[in-house]
Amino acid sequence: MDDWIDYYDSTHTIYVSKLHRDLHFQQIAKDIIGYISSHDAVVLDYACGEALSAAKVADACGKLILAEPAPGVRGRLIARFAPSTRIRVRSLQDLRKMEEKSIDLAIMNSVIQYMTPDELDAAFATIRRLLKPNGRLILGDVLRPEVGMLRDVLALLRFAAAHRFLKDAMIGLVSTALSDYRQLRSRVGLQRYSEAEITAKLATSGFSASRAHVNIGHNPWRMTFVARHAF
């Protein structure tokens, strides 16, 4: 995961335009809010990234914890949300010091493709310790083995057409093909899981899980899972 942390801590070009970036985070925030069942809920966003629409999520819950491994991104989050009484920014290491059974909802969205299987097991163990007995883990944007990059491209183009930034998307796809992201993706690779594989991996970590009908975000060919403590 370190290579990907370094990449996201740099000035990268994963979004084709500012509009794409803003709409991306707005869509994710909207989808996350759909899983919040109480205005008093404590929500953890694990490896949250820039979290540009986190304020909207925070308005829907009691407390939002943004846990981010990249130090530069984390610094920007701290600066942006310092005035907020509902948002706290933490490192992944900080989570180990948090009180157990203190989280109602944990989100891992578009994260596990960058983690080794051992790193993912460690993350699941941390989250399971933090979740309340009736808490939930939402595992979003899981890449499937049989779905290649072409579907990612099609999903982006559909999203772009719906929101009128198709020209920027076409230019951005060409830039991405020549970018550090594409080179890193080719060199390091991304982790992919079938539905059976990810539910089994969650079961090994003490969760029972089922696939959600709709994925978080704009890509319908990726998967989201809802996991709970296996009693």
Image (cartoon, helix red, strand yellow):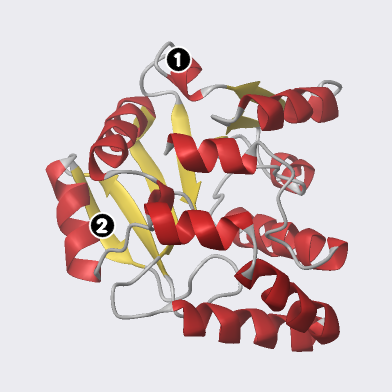
Identify whether 43 is placed above or below 102.
below
Residue labelled with disc 1: 98
The residue at 37%/24% (across/down) is 101
Which x, y percent locates residue 109?
50, 53
The residue type indicated by label 2 comes to Ala
The residue at 65%/68% (across/down) is 176
Identify whether 53 is placed above or below 129.
below
Quadrant hosting residue 225: bottom left
The N terminus - image quarter: top left
Quadrant hosting residue 146: bottom left
Q: Is residue 72 left or right of residue 17?
A: left
Which x, y percent locates residue 147?
37, 80
- In front: 227, or 75? 75
Q: Residues within 10 Å of mark 2 (few under 14, many from 20)?
A: many
- Compute the Cα span from label 1 to label 2: 24 Å
The residue type indicated by label 1 comes to Met
User: For numbered disc 1, what is the local secondary structure?
Assistant: loop
The C terminus - image quarter: top left
Identify whether 118 is placed above or below 84.
below
What label does residue 209 carry, if any?
A: 2
Label whose residue precedes the other's in the sequence (1 or 2): 1
- In front: 190, or 225? 190
Which x, y percent locates residue 6?
57, 36
